[in-house]
Amino acid sequence: MGTHIASTIFLLTCFQFLIITNLFIVKVHTCACHSGGEVTGHAPPPGACNTADSSACCADGQVYDIYDCSPPVSHHTKANLTLQSFNYGGAGGQPANCDGQYHSDDDLIVTLSTGWCDSGRRCNKSINIRGNGRRVRAKIVDECVSSGGCDDAHNYKPPCGNTIVRATKAVWSKLGVPETQWNTLVIHWSGA
């Protein structure tokens, strides 16, 4: 009953080993998504950074990691859910990248970190989110930029982490999270 490594596949910085035994096949994934650099924050000009939905603005002199990648997507991808408004005047400040539209906080919509957005290939697709003992399906309408930040182009917001799903109030409500706790929640998501 020997174990043989049948194949090794290199994907960016990820390795996948396929191990075959007499009884079953086991896939083992290891992936390191490391920071691709950093940006230093500068205090935004007055009124240039919207703090709606508990959004943070870049702090003067604070160093922030940036990422072009996110951990691999699976049927059980772990992420941090945060709150975002896609309304006109909401924390994002601009229309959603995927469709050029503003959206109601009553819509079941999300934005994903840069790596998970996959150069826009996940735009307008749906994901299943599991958290707080519940499940909800939401549509991807934007990218939470983790590859840059702290400048006018990014509304003086820090770079998004590489494991972030930002969601409307409607998503948080469907997950049954009390409004006083709408800030950060560990969730799992997958393609719908």
Image (spheres, rainbow, N blue to C red):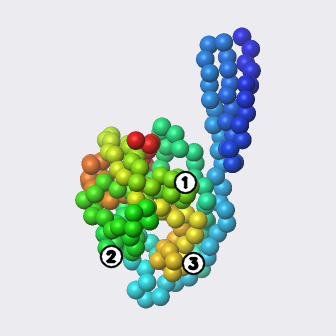
Q: Position of residue 153 (x, y in %)?
A: 51, 77
Can residue 180 be seen at all in this image of the molecule? no
Q: Residue at x 59, y 65 (%)?
A: 147
Q: Residue at x 40, y 59 (%)?
A: 141
Residue for badge 1: 118
Q: Residue at x 63, y 37 (%)?
A: 29
Disc 3 to disc 2, how far (Cα)? 23 Å
Q: Are marks 3 and 1 in contact (CB under 8 Å)?
A: no
Residue for badge 3: 41
Tell which circle, 3 or 1, labels the residue nearer the N-terminal end: 3
Disc 3 to disc 1, how far (Cα)? 26 Å
Disc 2 to disc 1, how far (Cα)? 26 Å
Which structural element holds mark 1?
Answer: loop
Q: Relative to 84, is 185 above or below?
A: above
Is 15 situated left or right of 58 in this image?
Answer: right
Amino acid type of the residue tagged 2 in the rendering: Gly
Residue for badge 2: 89
Q: Position of residue 34 (x, y in %)?
A: 66, 55
